[in-house]
Amino acid sequence: MTNELSLTPSRRRVLQGIMGTGALTATGFFPGFAHAQSAAPIRLGFQLHRTGIGASYGRWYERTATAALARINAAGGISGRPVEIQFEDDGTDPARGAEVFGKLATEAGCDLVFGALFSHVVIGTAPRAAELKVPYLVCSEGHHVASGMLNRWTMQPGITDVKSQVQAMAPFVTANLGKKVTMVFPDFAFGHDHRDYFTAAVAAQGGEVIAQIAIPPTETSFTRYFPQIPAETEVLYHVMVGPAVLTFVKEIGEFYGTGAKPQLFGFMDSLEAVDIASPGLEFLEGSHFWEAHPRYKQADASAAETAYRAAVGVDDNGASVTDATDIATYSHMFSVWETLSVIKAGMEASGYQGPDDRAKFIEAVEAMTAFDEGEDHPQGAKTFNGKTHQAFGIQNISKVEGGKLTVVHKTAIEDGMYPDEVDYTTQAL
Amino acid sequence: MKGRVWGAHLGLLALLVLAHFLLPDYHHNNVAKVMVLACYAMGYNIAFGYTGLLSLGHALFFASGLYATALSINLLGWSAGPALALGLVAGAVMAVAVGLLALRTAGVAFMIVTLMFAQAGYLTILYLGQWTRGDEGIVIAQGLRVVAGFDLSAEGPRYLAAFALFGAGLLANLWLVRSPFGRVMVAMRENEARARMLGYNPFRVKLASLVISGLYAGAAGAAYAVMFGYAGASLAGVQYSILPMLWVLLGGAGTVMGPFIGCLLMFYLVAYSANVTSASLLVVGLVLVALVLFAPKGLLGSLRARGVTWLP
């Protein structure tokens, strides 16, 4: 039982009285405070990592969102209403992320907010979403949504989470590459998720993680960590994020040189926005990578995949069509496109008219169970768990052949599923 | 003069009460956050602006309050009230521990030692990821952010709680700097050797100042955890040691209201420069360069130097 702390007259009544005069709205001092009516455009907020550690992702997330928006508007918008996206830079910072969320939701009058990738931004922002009761659809990969850590207003319908990804891939690693695995990962929460979930998944397949090498987050050179890799290692599992990824991968190559080396299995995060043909990466030939969405266009690419690739301006090699050196964050950015598809479907299913229908939107998305592969979901079909607010999909394991990544194995959706850890539908909206 | 001093400070508080009724939601929440952060900045100002202790490690004190509160709620099952009190104490206790060691140094060495302590604290938070979730951080569930029946996740109670914290901090700060001890703090800043000659023990005065500073920082950190529901390692990083220094420098070091004004201006400078350019930090940098060139004593400091001599 909480008290409603109030002073007389209440803040709301005073504010409404002033707004009633129209004085402040007429001056434009508080833009967006008077919300759009049902005939007006639907306004979506995008929490963008334009600067900070996530900038290489943010640049492509913005392009993807813009392309997805153009497609939706060309097809008549959402429920016949045009759609707008307001992008706001969060600096890839959690405190700023919460402030940006508030700005988008209250000042800009956005109907909902989506697009955040980095876990600390998502976790720092989610409480604000619940306070304001504004839907927050994240494109983060983190297990934080499905773990039950967040709240009913936060959903992840456009991309699978780390726990699901490593669980789905472990059988391929132990069956094809080796059973004695050494892991190299960043020594913070994202890396710890890999460490914990992959170690458990490998053990479940009869394999063993024989060494876990955590790299401190402040590290810029990695050579001194590699001698810790046990000689009997059969598979070196590596994952790294941030501006030092290219250095990290290059130094692995320098460490092994032309001599014998274990099988290498990497998370594509280690190479997102990095050209695999960069000098010093030749040693990656023959190694394997996880990809959520294959960077190089595959021979069996669907028509939807081809259309998506063209819409976001990415060529067959995963680079910008206007600049072959501008490599996309292709393995992750589809989540923005697919999340926007879910937003459209959710709003139309709920009969969304305006902010008063935000709770109906959440319930409509929770009621979804599957997304078919197609133009709305070019990465592939997905299952959606309305209780945990998390999507489950296929994973790709690709091999570097001739300097390009070729998919050699696709997991089934079921390979990445695990028992529910939360039921958000029991929380009040 | 006494009337003008109290009038100015009580006037600021009255404006903030008025703002509670008038500000739309976005600005209402912003000002609530600024008041909490200004409490942190006031603490920094007590050490730096009044006592001359240029610390680069205050994020450690802020984070001590933040994590003591957040972890006692999430791991120990404490209610928010006692957890807030623990956070406040944690900031002060950490300041005692750091002060006993760091105050053996002075000047640049003090900056480096405090920076190292803060970095050690930051890395400890990452190391203890099992409980802190490191860089990702942890959330405090909305239902647990209730103090004495007031839900501090709701905009009204949160604003008024932030106002109460800030108001108490501001008036205590005003009283402190006008007290005999406050004048001894200033004496340490201006001429430590002379103060020692007069019989004051510099170590004890500076330690006391640092502990009061840590108390403010811990209180702000604890309030941040409960009011905004998040504790993450980024709030313990070097950026959060630099920020209070910038707020204080912008508003005016050694002025009671300066930290609030600096924090408010910097907050909106970052928020609105992002509308113009993605290089918002460049804008902030240019403003700081202009500040150094044209108002090196900060806004209120310059005002005081140009005639408003009664500003404390």
Image (cartoon, grey):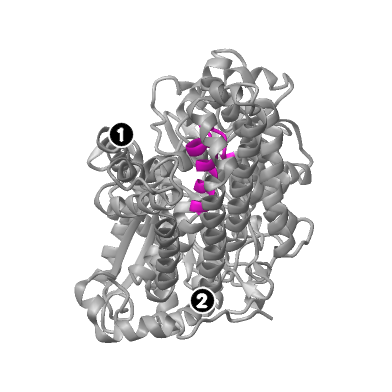
Instruction: Pinpoint residue A204: horizontal percent, then vertical percent.
Output: 77, 46
**Principal secondary structure, stretch drawn in magenta:** helix
Q: Quadrant of residue B10?
A: bottom left
Please identify the quadrant where the N terminus of chain B is shown.
Answer: bottom left
Q: Amino acid at mark 2?
A: Ile
User: Residue placed at 50% from the left, 40% from the top?
Assistant: A269
Q: Amino acid at mark 1?
A: Val
Instruction: Pinpoint residue A254: horizontal percent, then vertical percent.
Output: 52, 16
Q: Is residue A235 visible?
A: yes
Instruction: Pinpoint residue A410: horizontal percent, then vertical percent.
Output: 55, 49
In-front residue for pair B249/A274: B249
Q: Which mark is residue A362?
A: 2
Q: What range is drawn magenta here?
A: B37-59
- Crowd band around label 1 with a 10 angstrom C-alpha radius: few (<14), some (14–19), many (20+): some
* Mark 1 or mark 2, whichever is nearer to me: 1
Q: Is residue A89 above or below residue A421?
A: above
Instruction: Pinpoint residue B295: horizontal percent, then vertical percent.
Output: 29, 38
A76 is within the stretch colored magenta? no
Q: Is residue A281 above or below residue B147?
A: above
- Local secondary structure at mark 2: helix
In-front residue for pair A20/B247: B247
In-front residue for pair A70/A383: A70
Query: On the picture, is B289 further left or further right than B196?
Result: left
Q: Which mark is residue A20?
A: none
Q: CA distance from mark 1 to mark 2?
A: 50 Å
Q: Is residue A240 visible?
A: no
Q: Which residue is mark 1?
A: B292
| Image mark 2: chain | A
User: Residue placed at 64% from the left, 47% from the top?
Assistant: B215
- Local secondary structure at mark 1: helix
